[in-house]
């Protein structure tokens, strides 16, 4: 392994890839120690900050920075994972609501708040990841304190899907925000689309798609590394 490198590579993760898949591929291509600064679920796309070489020591620093997501919430159905990849566990009618109702609900979810941690998450309780307990049929309820800085570009589609842009602090689960919003609107819901567009002061528009990286030589990739 070559640890002479100390830098950041911005990757626009595609749906279907795990964050670990991306790290493994980059590690193999770059032949250096590799990590990332915040997991994206397989169903999510968007910005992954890949840390190379000695920059892996900065993982905690970048994990703690605010992140911005584009979120689509589908109302009326709740899944066990709180996203589109899970199994439906509950349905509920979707009542009529207005943009003012949505803005009011999101207002209650602003600033420093408590939000429920998804049952299917890597958060550990008693040393065991919650998703492992959930797979055994033991859903553990746990809340965490997070900070929501800003809601923007809120819209409603004809089929009552709610889209928004949210900037939030570290440890925030976008799935939890969709779950809470649906509850405040008197129904159930789940995330049907999730894309991270900003993190650590970087924007996804400056990132490489993993399919582009596959076609690049190590030297070409090195030219895209932001040295620290």
Image (tube, grey):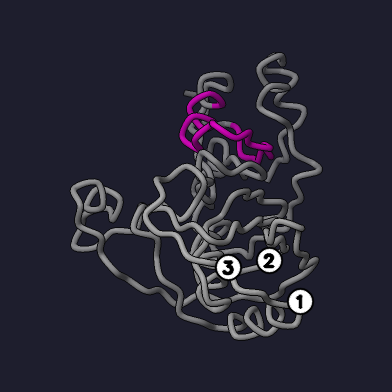
Residue for badge 3? 94
Q: Position of residue 139 (x, y in %)?
A: 25, 60
Residue contact at pointers 1 and 3, CB within 8 angstroms: no
Residue for badge 1? 99
The residue shown at (60%, 57%) is 74
Q: Of the residues tagged 3 and 2, which is closer to the observer?
A: 3
Residue contact at pointers 1 and 2, CB within 8 angstroms: no
Q: Is residue 111 visible?
A: yes
Quote the CA–CA distance across marks 3 and 2: 23 Å
Q: Is residue 12 magenta?
A: yes
Q: Could you tell which of marks 1 and 2 lies nearer the N-terminus? A: 1
What residue range appears in magenta? 5-26
Pick whichever, 7 or 198, lies toward us. Answer: 198
Snapshot quadrant of residue 144: bottom left
Quote the CA–CA distance across marks 1 and 2: 16 Å
Whether residue 126 is situated above or below residue 47 in the rendered picture: below
Residue for badge 2? 166
Q: Of the residues tagged 1 and 3, which is closer to the observer?
A: 3
Pick whichever, 22 or 43, lies toward us. Answer: 43
């Amino acid at each position: 392994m070559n640890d002479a490198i100390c830098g950041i590579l911005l990757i626009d993760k595609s749906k279907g890839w795990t964050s670990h898949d991306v790290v493994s591929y980059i590690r193999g291509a770059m032949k250096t120690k590799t990590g990332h600064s915040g997991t994206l679920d397989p169903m999510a796309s968007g910005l992954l900050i890949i840390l190379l070489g000695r920059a892996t020591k900065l993982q905690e620093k970048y994990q703690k920075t605010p992140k911005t997501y584009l979120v689509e919430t589908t109302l009326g159905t709740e899944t066990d994972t709180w996203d589109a990849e899970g199994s439906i566990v509950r349905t509920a009618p979707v009542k009529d609501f207005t943009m003012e109702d949505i803005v009011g609900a999101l207002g209650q979810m602003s600033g420093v708040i408590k939000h429920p941690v998804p049952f299917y998450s890597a958060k550990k309780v008693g040393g065991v990841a919650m998703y492992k307990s959930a797979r055994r049929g033991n859903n553990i309820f746990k809340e965490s304190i997070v900070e929501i800085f800003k809601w923007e570009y809120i819209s409603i589609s004809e089929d009552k899907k709610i889209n928004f842009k949210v900037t939030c602090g570290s440890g925030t689960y976008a799935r939890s925000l969709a779950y809470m919003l649906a509850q405040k609107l008197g129904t159930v819901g789940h995330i049907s689309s999730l894309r991270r567009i900003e993190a650590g002061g970087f924007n996804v528009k400056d990132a490489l798609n993993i399919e582009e990286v596959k076609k690049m030589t190590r030297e070409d990739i090195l030219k895209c590394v932001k040295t620290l």
